[in-house]
Amino acid sequence: MVEVTVRDGEQLERALRRFKKKWERAGVLRELKKKSFYVKPSDEKRVSRKKTMRRLARFARYAAQ
């Protein structure tokens, strides 16, 4: 759970900005989107393989330079 305490004399907008940054870093929205619908295990494997291949291709391009 993301929690931010408002400091003495701190503006509410600044505290809200700190909360939003913590919320993004914690990955709450990403997790919510991921769990919003069911993904078959075979589809998960396919997507993870595709991500891995992209990452390896990107690494190979950087290594070639």
Image: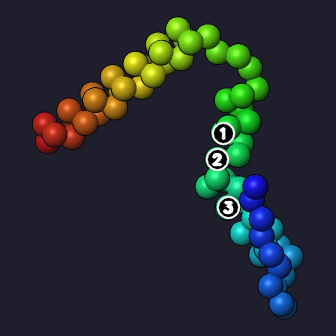
Q: Which amino acid does label 1 sit on?
A: Arg
Above or below residue 63? Residue 45 is above
> Where is residue 52 drawn, in percent x and y?
36, 26
Whole-Å distance between the Cαs marked 2 and 3?
9 Å
- Helix, strand or loop at mark 1: helix
Residue 35: x %, y % from top left: 72, 28
The answer to whether any part of residue 21 appears in the image is: yes
- For label 2, the crowd category at 10 Å Cα-Cα, with few meaning under 14, some 14 to 19 and many 20 or more, is few
**37 sits left or right of 47 in the view:** right
Which residue extends farthest left? 64
Does the image show residue 17? no
Give the quadrant of the N terminus.
Answer: bottom right
Which quadrant of the view contains residue 16? bottom right
Please name the residue that numbered disc 3 is placed on.
22
Using the image, determine if residue 47 lies above or below residue 60.
above
Pointer 1 residue: 30
Q: Which amino acid does label 3 sit on?
A: Lys
Q: Distance between the residues labelled 1 and 2?
A: 5 Å
Q: What element carries label 3?
A: helix
Q: In which quarter of the image is the C terminus?
A: top left
The residue that label 2 is drawn on is: 27
